[in-house]
Image (cartoon, rainbow, N blue to C red):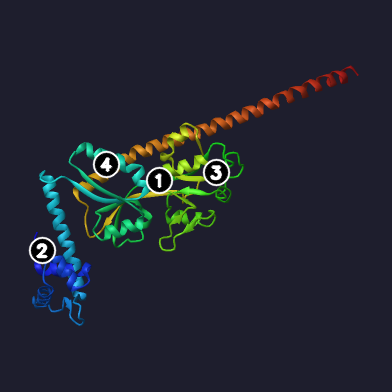
Amino acid sequence: MAKTPGLLDLLALVPAADIARAAKALGLDPEALTKRLLALDSTGISTRLVDTATRALKPGEAGRLVIDHAARIFTQARDLTRDLEELAGLQAPEMHFGTDLFAAELPLGAALGRMASANSRLRVHAETSDFEHLAREVLAGKLEFAVGDTAGAERHPTRLAIEPVAEHRMFFFVRQGHPLVAAKEHSLETILVFPLVSPRLPQRMAVHLGKVAARARVDRETGDLTPSLMVDSFAVARNAVMAGDAVGLAPLVALEHDIRTREISLLPFTAPWLQLSYGLFYTRKRPLSRVAQLFMTQLRQVEVVLQAREQRALARLNGKKRTRRSATRRKAKTAAEPSAHAAKSTAAPARRARIRQ
């Protein structure tokens, strides 16, 4: 779909902010661009599209409305062309999207690997960042969609559409031999006496952790928590935990190997808010492309595997706890048996003595 010159001129005004820059972007003389913009107001529309009250021509209220609709139409036309060419095999499928740290480390790689196996021509451009940056890029049309914590997307219900994927419980963890392993109490206050190491944490966790976590800061703009030791991945957090007395926070599926080898210990603290919900979000003005929808399907299939692994890991942990409790009870019972036997042995002569009397 070709863009009409007048609308293209109007669209160029927005990012350029003045005639000279807009003219340069279009390869036109500023005077020629001015004439073309003024000609837009003689197209039969009863309200002005361009504000001529100031020396710098700018879109008026009606002009901004036209720009909004035109940008959406042009984007959809471009997406349609791309999807048709991909379907016909004329163009390699391509995705430009963003991801937060959690999705980048766990489900994302497996989902992309599956897609690449199914289509060797697939081209992917992924950007890793925090929610606020990803949301701005999605709303600006620079990214088609983003994968990450859905709590942030819920703050923009009229602008962002959300496709929930899964939830994962988060666990505090420490190295074996850490003082907290042998502690009798594991409240939030006793745990966070020690430095917290993790990636940036979402608002729902920040509300609780920010009050007690030593040297942590809550972002006033986003409500997210910056831990005292903020890192870019769960792998780096794990290494920091293994090297000292810091406390890590991560989903169970990121800790499976270390749990099996008993290099780390999970702390017995749980709370409803220690839950990471993630999904795919995109602007309501732009429906997902075919390749993005295929990616969504692969992501859900990967999650089925991850959820099963998480359930097995939890079952193993609970089994070990039951085994330890049973062993403790057996020890206590064994220790009590000699005392009971000794008491019986002492009582028997006394009874015989009473009988003789």
The amino acid on which the numbered mark 2 sits, given as a three-letter code, is: Lys
Decide which of tag 3 and tag 1 comes sooner along the chain.
Answer: 1
Q: Which residue matches tag 2?
A: 3
Decide which of tag 4 and tag 2 comes sooner along the chain.
Answer: 2
Q: Residues within 10 Å of mark 1 (few under 14, many from 20)?
A: some
The amino acid on which the numbered mark 1 sits, given as a three-letter code, is: Ser
Camera-nearest residue between 257 and 157: 257
Label placed on residue 118? none
Residue 37, horizontal then vertical, whole percent: 12, 74
The residue at 61%/30% (across/down) is 328
What kind of element bears circle 3? loop
Q: Which residue matches tag 1?
A: 233
The residue at 81%/20% (across/down) is 348
Q: CA distance from mark 2 to mark 3?
A: 61 Å
Q: Quadrant of the N terminus?
A: bottom left
Q: Are marks 2 and 3 in contact (CB under 8 Å)?
A: no
Decide which of tag 2 and tag 3 comes sooner along the chain.
Answer: 2
Side of 166 where 316 appears, left or right = right
Q: Which residue matches tag 3?
A: 245
Q: CA distance from mark 1 to mark 2?
A: 44 Å
Q: Which residue matches tag 4?
A: 112
Q: CA distance from mark 1 to mark 4?
A: 19 Å
Q: Comparing marks 2 and 3, which lies closer to the viewer?
A: 3
The residue at 54%/30% (across/down) is 323
Decide which of tag 4 and tag 3 comes sooner along the chain.
Answer: 4
